[in-house]
Image (cartoon, rainbow, N blue to C red):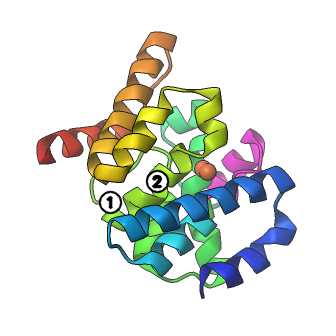
């Protein structure tokens, strides 16, 4: 399974805007992987699959997680969009034949990141965050894009700092994994 084959199989299920976002993320992830000497096919595959279920709504995410018998974290209950990565990874495996556990792990955790992320996973994660459309809406992300050219882990830390600061300011809950991921990146710096 390569990213092109996966794109062809996913495309009929996705709204146009989401497909365009995924196409941009694959290209940015590809460039980051080449720049940092990473496994390009694996990075592209994770980028291609990352938002398979982003187009669902809160009720559908919760229903699918319940149907799987998952323990839903209270933060996920309040923000069901957090479930689109974990649910997407399951469906990519079950319905689309994606079996690379590193790719599925990257997709599962692409919203908060994960302490065990590989550099390929970070390349996919960052490519998603610095989609030019997202930078337009939140210009602070431009700095994350700039840092990613030099160091993926520095850029990931800068991204988590930004999102956590924004969550505190806005009074939003913080996903526990985002905190664990940031702590791990801080220790490694
Ligand atoms: Fe996503
Ligand atoms: Fe995305």
Q: Mark 2 falls on what kind of element?
A: helix
Q: Residue at x 47, y 24 (%)?
A: 173
Which residue is the extreme one toward the bottom?
1
Q: Report the front residue among 183 and 57.
A: 183
Q: Is residue 56 magenta?
A: yes
Question: Where, by quadrant of the figure, is residue 85 drawn?
Answer: bottom right
> Which residue is identified by label 1?
117
Q: Residue at x 76, y 51 (%)?
A: 55
Q: Is residue 45 magenta?
A: no
Q: Report the front residue among 9 and 72.
A: 9
Q: Is residue 14 above or below residue 39?
A: above
Circle nearer the viewer, 1 or 2: 2
Cα distance, mark 1 to mark 2? Answer: 10 Å
Whether residue 175 appears in this view of the structure is no
- Crowdedness of circle 2 by 10 Å Cα count: few (<14), some, many (20+)? many
Q: Mark 1 falls on what kind of element?
A: loop
Q: Residue at x 35, y 73 (%)?
A: 38
Q: Position of residue 111 (x, y in %)?
A: 50, 46
Q: Position of residue 93 (x, y in %)?
A: 59, 77
Q: Position of residue 123 (x, y in %)?
A: 42, 59
Mark 2 or mark 1, which is nearer the start of the sequence? Answer: 1
Say if mark 1 contacts mark 2, CB within 8 Å: yes
Q: Is residue 37 above or below residue 151?
A: below
Q: Which quarter of the rendering shows the N terminus?
A: bottom right
Q: Residue at x 40, y 42 (%)?
A: 146
Q: Which residues are magenta?
A: 50-67
Q: Which quarter of the rendering shows the C terminus?
A: top left
Q: Is residue 13 left or right of residue 164?
A: right
Q: Position of residue 67 (x, y in %)?
A: 67, 59
Which numbered circle lies on residue 125?
2
Whether residue 77 appears in this view of the structure is yes
Question: Where, by quadrant of the figure, is residue 160 drawn?
Answer: top left
């Amino acid at each position: 399974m390569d990213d092109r084959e996966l794109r062809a199989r996913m495309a009929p299920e996705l709204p146009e805007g989401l497909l365009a976002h995924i196409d941009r993320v694959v290209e940015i992830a590809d460039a980051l992987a080449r720049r940092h000497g990473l496994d390009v096919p694996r990075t592209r595959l994770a980028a291609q699959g990352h938002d398979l279920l982003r187009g669902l709504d809160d009720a559908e995410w919760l229903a699918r997680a319940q149907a799987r018998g998952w323990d839903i974290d209270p933060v996920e209950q309040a923000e069901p969009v957090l479930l689109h990565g974990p649910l997407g990874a399951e469906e990519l495996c079950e319905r689309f034949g994606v079996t690379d556990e590193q790719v599925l792990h990257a997709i599962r955790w692409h919203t908060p990141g994960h302490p065990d992320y590989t550099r390929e996973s970070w390349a996919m994660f960052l490519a998603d965050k610095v989609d030019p459309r997202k930078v337009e809406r939140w210009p602070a992300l431009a700095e994350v894009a700039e840092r990613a050219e030099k160091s993926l882990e520095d850029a990931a830390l800068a991204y988590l700092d930004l999102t956590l600061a924004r969550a505190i300011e806005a009074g939003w809950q913080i996903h526990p994994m985002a905190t664990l991921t940031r702590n791990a990146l801080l220790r490694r710096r």
